[in-house]
Image (cartoon, rainbow, N blue to C red):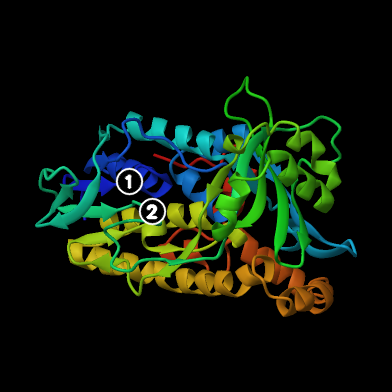
């Protein structure tokens, strides 16, 4: 299908910005609506996996992400009180040069937003989308948008446009973006975690910088039940710090940067998988289509893949309805596999279960070191299981090249 059509996108996050930019470059007239007065990112940090970097390469943005981000070579975790290694996933098990890119959500947002502006996308801020009708968005104030040939829901986990509400997960996490400590003993190229059964988890993820002159930072996170958030807020921050120290004393340089409860943001998680990303009068991308806990670190990468798949279908398949059906087929297998994997893995690291962490520590942990399990785990982490790029129609080497090579940006 050629460009020249009008598309309205609700949501100015990773999926909405990436999709809008890809379509605008293909000649579509794109308008993005966001409820905030000034669009801004939510959250602390994430890992861009090779599949996500491949999409950024299509946008011509992979190089910028590498410049600001931090190379991630492994995911590593120990459990207390034994100090046993129960998580050790190394990217090189899949490919000697493979790695992820830890990035600040703010940096990723600025990269995508600048590209969207440069592509000529129109932005409508302070527009709270609540429904769709006859090719138009309907807003909370009773007004409605202009008519579009295509409406896209990129509103995320709590999208009012999704036909299915997410099932809230008991555990969420406290997050903060903190300066990286010199000589702190942390691996600048690893996501490191410490666990107490599956009830407690503290983690440190290198996320690079917000800009050239900004300091290196880490996403610091602490597992917490949503139902315990009120009690946490009503308890001295020093009591919480003592609890973190009891799990991982070496995090003191990070704890010293936390002065009040307001220095931490709580993230709720939910699990939802739509049977199809197509609803009456609208198509869903990103967390509006499927959402889960961040245990596998795939959320932003899934959003980028959705954006690439939908734009590829719309620009290569004849007929709008046929293109949307093609998009749904492209993303079906990969989505189902990773939603299932997340559903299985999440309670192993965040739950009240005693049996699951026991199995993790004494059976799954040792097995993870025996081939081919290290290769399977690396493939799972990189987002490669289900061959999502090949399903979309991308070259098989796109993901590898985008992560590693300075010349990998391939935007036209």
Q: Which residue is mark 1?
A: 11
Q: Nearer the viewer, residue 63 or 143?
A: 143
Which of the two residues, 236 or 187, is positioned nearer the viewer here?
236
Above-or-below relation of 302 to 107? below
Could one spot residue 177 in this view of the protein?
Answer: yes
- Quarter of the figure that contains the C terminus: top left
Q: Where does residue 290 sit, x and y in percent of width and height? A: 42, 64
Picture layout, residue 169 above or below residue 17: below
| Mark 2: few/some/many CA within 10 Å (<14, 14-19, 20+) | many
Q: Is residue 197 above or below residue 241?
A: below
Looking at the image, which residue is at 22% across and 60% down?
282
Give x and y (percent) for residue 67. Answer: 61, 32
For the N terminus, which image quadrant? bottom left
**What residue lies at 37% left-to-right and 56% top-to-bottom?**
158
Q: Is residue 95 left or right of residue 16?
A: right
Q: Quadrant of residue 212?
A: top right
Q: Which residue is mark 2?
A: 156
Secondary structure at numbered mark 2: loop
Residue 48 appears anywhere in the view = no
Q: Tags 2 and 1 in contact by the CB under 8 Å rule?
A: yes
Going from the N terminus, do you reach mark 2 or mark 1 first?
A: 1
């Amino acid at each position: 299908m050629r460009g020249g059509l009008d598309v309205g996108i609700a949501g100015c996050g990773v999926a909405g910005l990436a999709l809008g930019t890809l379509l605008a470059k293909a000649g579509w007239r794109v308008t993005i609506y966001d409820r905030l007065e000034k669009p801004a990112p939510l959250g602390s940090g994430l890992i861009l996996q090779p599949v996500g970097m491949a999409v950024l390469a299509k946008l011509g943005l992979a190089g910028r992400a590498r410049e600001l981000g931090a190379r991630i070579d492994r995911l590593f975790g120990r459990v207390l009180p034994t100090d046993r290694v129960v998580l050790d996933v190394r990217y090189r098990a899949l490919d000697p040069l493979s790695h992820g890119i830890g990035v600040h959500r703010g940096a990723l947002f600025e990269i995508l937003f600048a590209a969207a502006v440069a592509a000529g996308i129109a932005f409508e801020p302070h527009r709270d989308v609540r429904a769709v009708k006859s090719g138009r968005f309907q807003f909370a104030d009773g007004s409605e948008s202009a008519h579009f040939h295509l409406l896209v829901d990129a509103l995320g986990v709590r999208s009012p446009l999704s036909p299915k509400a997410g099932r809230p997960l008991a555990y969420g996490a406290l997050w903060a973006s903190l300066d990286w400590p010199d000589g702190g003993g942390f691996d600048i190229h690893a996501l490191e975690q410490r666990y107490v059964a599956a009830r407690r988890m503290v983690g440190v993820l290198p996320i690079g910088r917000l800009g050239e002159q900004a300091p290196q930072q880490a996403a610091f996170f602490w597992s917490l039940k949503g139902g315990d958030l009120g009690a946490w807020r009503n308890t001295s921050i020093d009591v919480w710090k003592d609890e973190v120290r009891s799990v991982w004393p070496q995090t003191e340089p990070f704890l010293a940067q936390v002065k009040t409860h307001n220095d931490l943001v709580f993230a709720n998680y939910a699990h939802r998988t739509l049977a199809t990303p197509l609803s009456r009068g609208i198509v869903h991308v990103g967390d509006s289509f499927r959402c889960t806990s961040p245990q596998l670190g795939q959320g932003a990468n899934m959003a980028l893949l959705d954006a690439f798949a939908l734009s590829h279908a719309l620009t290569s398949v004849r007929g709008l309805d046929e293109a949307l059906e093609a998009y749904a087929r492209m993303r079906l297998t990969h989505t189902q596999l990773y939603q299932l994997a997340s559903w299985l893995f999440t309670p192993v690291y965040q739950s009240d279960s005693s049996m699951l962490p026991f199995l993790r520590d004494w059976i799954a942990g040792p097995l993870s070191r025996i081939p081919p399990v290290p290769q399977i785990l690396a493939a799972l982490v990189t987002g490669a299981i289900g061959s999502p790029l090949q399903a979309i129609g991308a070259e098989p080497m796109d993901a590898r090249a985008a992560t590693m090579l300075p010349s990998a940006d391939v935007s036209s």
